[in-house]
Image (cartoon, helix red, strand yellow):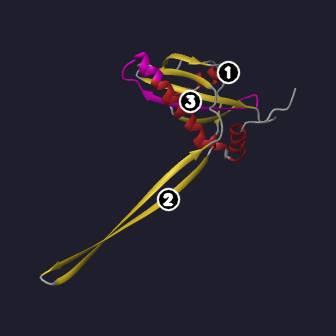
Amino acid sequence: MPSEKIPSIYFTIFLVLMLSPSSFFVQSLHGQVKQPPFINVHINPPFKKVLLNDPLLMQISGAKIIRLKSGKTMIVGVASTNIANKSVDQRVAADRILRVKADREIIQLTGEVQIAVEEIIDDKTVIVIKDGKETAQLVERYREIIKATITQKTKSLPFVGRWYSADGDRLFYAVGAIIDEQK
């Protein structure tokens, strides 16, 4: 079997795992699968058992790092949005938006964050001549714009699943991967 290059996101995730304190990890739960407060749950194996065991993993948006019993690490990015009507067009649009948001959750954890600060100083001088007298007024306005840009040079992680809140008003979407740190 030819050696395969590890994609950059997997390597970055591996570094995050190795350098992060253990409080960042969510330990997988053991026991039987409980029925979470969700409907229309479609989750790909092997993510299904882990996510269904802990409804908070499914309910709270963000990136999750989960150590499995096998020694592998599961990373999952979850995003959600409210669904006003359940038309096909809105669900398709929501899927596209949530895909980007779920990817962003993982990139925020593993990507390079660049912060740019832009300082703008506007000077304005007004000279008024009245009755032969000159008066000057100097107005200075200072603005600071801070922008954070997150970059990651990788493809999106694979689709993990989608589900709705119990009342059907909130759609959840997840992407993720399983990493074998021993390789």
Secondary element at tag 1: loop
Secondary element at tag 3: helix
The residue lying at 52 percent from left, 50 percent from top is 148
Secondary element at tag 2: strand
Which circle's residue, 1 or 3, is located before the other in the chain? 1
The residue lying at 63 percent from left, 24 percent from top is 50
Of labels 3 and 2, the one closer to you: 2
Label drawn at residue 117 = 2
Classed neighbour count for the residue bearing mark 1: other residues with Cα under 10 Å, few (<14), some (14–19), many (≥20) = few
How much space separates mark 3 and mark 2, taking CA atoms? 35 Å
Q: Are marks 1 and 3 in contact (CB under 8 Å)?
A: no
For the magenta stretch, what is the residue range? 68-92
In this orientation, does residue 152 appear?
A: yes
The residue lying at 21 percent from left, 80 percent from top is 135
Coordinates of residue 162 in the picture (x, y in percent): 54, 22
On screen, residue 141 above or below 127: above
Q: Left or right: 79 with respect to 8?
A: left
Determine which quarter of the picture holds residue 122: bottom left
Q: 5 or 121: which is nearer to us?
A: 121
Q: Report the amino acid beneath label 2.
A: Val
